[in-house]
Image: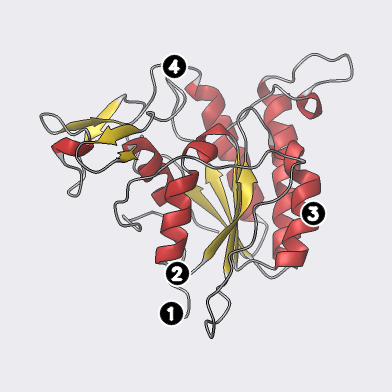
Amino acid sequence: MLALVVALGLAACAPSGQPSTAAGSSPPPPTVEGPGEPARPTIAVYGDSLTQQAWSELQTGAAEKGYRLAGGAFAGTAACDWMDRISSEVPAQRPAYLVLAFTGNNLTPCTHSVDGSPLEGAALVDRYGVDVEAEANVGLAAGATVFIVEPPAMLSDDALRQQFAARYQEVVGHLMGSWLVDGGALLTPNGFRFTAPCLPQETVAMGCVDGLIPIRAADGGHLAPPVPVRGTGTTYSSGAWRYAAAMIGPVQLAGG
């Protein structure tokens, strides 16, 4: 399948926080529809810290497209940490879309070798490829369209990120109904950067200064933390908005 090129698919919004669920914890409660309202279809998203940072934007974006958001994200986790959750939740929920957004952590035991040392390089990339493919197959068997998110560029070790992108491309290349999504389409289209030109809806109150706005954190990996939007009592992270837009921008409007 071809990689999807993402347009700006979400309206600007100001998140109030980044709720998430850790692997192995209780899943988020289902959205309760109002009296007489049809049940909304589901987008199930699973990921690590970048997805956790973008969770509020994902919730808003999913709702604007007519979906409810399910799944979970937690900092430091890998695809293998979510295997049990995905294997149980996705067949039960039968989401319209399954989004897998893993950037390559090797902190948890399932990403370690038999001697307890963290997998690195090609071995780590291959572990992710095997696990993401297995999770994608769960989604496909449940009738979902699957998006596998290519990691955005990081400040360091971009060669490894490119290996992940190539491995994910291999996965979607032989799984009909799965697509590779460029997670850096709005964050890092031309390589890593701490700031980016402001989007049309981003104002001075949201952090746009002299035409630029922070999108990445000082550590060179995470998204810029949310900042208070002056005069509104809300917060906003351009990096979180852009990453969420990349992840679910290709989702079609429900009923469309």
First in sequence: mark 3 vs mark 2: 3
Q: Nearer the viewer, residue 172 or 119?
A: 119
Residue at 81% x, 47% y is 84
Q: Amino acid at mark 4?
A: Asp
Image position of 220 (left or right of 125): left
Q: Residues within 10 Å of mark 1 (few under 14, many from 20)?
A: few
First in sequence: mark 1 vs mark 4: 4
- Residue 122: % across, % down: 68, 25
| Res. 218 image quadrant | top left
Q: Extreme left residue here?
A: 210
Task: Please name the residue that numbered disc 3 is placed on.
Answer: 87
What numbered label is drawn on residue 256? Answer: 1
- Helix, strand, or loop for circle 3? helix
First in sequence: mark 2 vs mark 4: 4
CA gap between label 2 and label 1 equals: 7 Å
Query: Which quarter of the figure is the C terminus placed in?
Result: bottom left
CA gap between label 3 and label 1 equals: 28 Å
Residue at 47% x, 51% y is 58
Q: Given contact means CB atoms under 8 Å apart, are the residues at marks 3 and 2 in contact?
A: no
Q: Residues within 10 Å of mark 4 (few under 14, many from 20)?
A: few
